[in-house]
Image: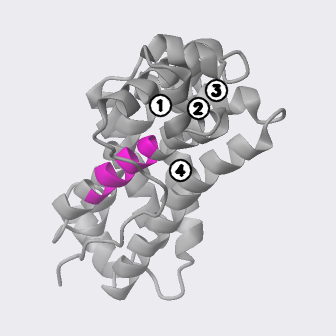
Amino acid sequence: MPATAPAPLPGPCCDDASPKRRAVLDSAARLFMAEGYAAVSMDAVARAAQVSKATLYAHFPGKDALFAEIVGNNCRRMRDEMASAAQAGTGHALAPALAALGARWLRFLLEPRVRALHRVVVAECIRAPELARAFYTAGPQALRHWLAGWLEEQAARGQLRPGTDTALVADQFLALLRGDLFLRATLGLADSPSEAEILALAREAARAVVRLHGSPAALAAAETEGFA
């Protein structure tokens, strides 16, 4: 029985076609990632985007709304990436489908822009917990819920052991993917990993999950696919 496409990831997104709005978002993102949230003023964003303050405030009532939309747009890209990977994995066994999802997420997570956004949120989380909350809700939490739902579908297909806690499996899989690689890259202690490294890590994470939680059918398919 083929895998079905999972439900969309929830979260805010914006695809406004206004050139001025796009200019504001792009300029603000560059400033936030270069200088940090606290150091950037709305005046600086207006100057960088070459728009008037009236135009800026017509689109965004304040800096928090501007940052929230930048986060939302990145979450939309993540949603699209994961949905595309899930669709491409339709009909595949659990191990290769998980590996494809993992590789797609790692590529997104390790983008310089995404890592920079993560640094901004971490730097501001004590001073502005609402920013951290918005980031977590629209990004990591939404992804965790989406992945747990996808795993529920795999359980319904007989790919997981009966009674498996899919939320726990989602946590374990994402933790295996992030690992030391993401931390070193975010801290600037390592170069961006190669595609071969990303694929290898995604395969290892998928293999571990299937070994721990896969049904006999999933384990047999994993062996056939070279994941044993």
Q: x, y (%) of residue 178?
A: 52, 40
The answer to whether marks 2 and 3 mark residues whose Cβ atoms lie closer than 8 Å is yes
Gap between marks 2 and 1 measured at Cα: 6 Å
| Residue behind mark 3 | 120
Q: Give the mark, 4 or 2, whose residue is nearer the N terminus.
A: 2
In the structure shown, which secondary structural element does the residue marked by tag 3 occupy?
helix
Q: Is residue 42 above or below residue 17?
A: above
Front residue of this view, candidates 105 and 163: 105
Circle 2 sits in a helix, a strand or a loop, which is it? Answer: helix
Label 1: few (<14), some (14–19) or many (≥20) C-alpha neighbours in 10 Å: some
Q: Distance between the residues labelled 4 and 2?
A: 10 Å
Please tell me which residue is depicted at 63% across the width and 12% down the height of the picture.
Answer: 35
Q: How far apart are marks 4 and 3 (CA)?
A: 14 Å
Q: In this view, does 87 lie to the left or right of 203?
A: left
Would you say the residues marked 4 and 2 are in contact, meaning their CB atoms lie under 8 Å apart? no
Residue 122: x percent and y percent? 70, 31
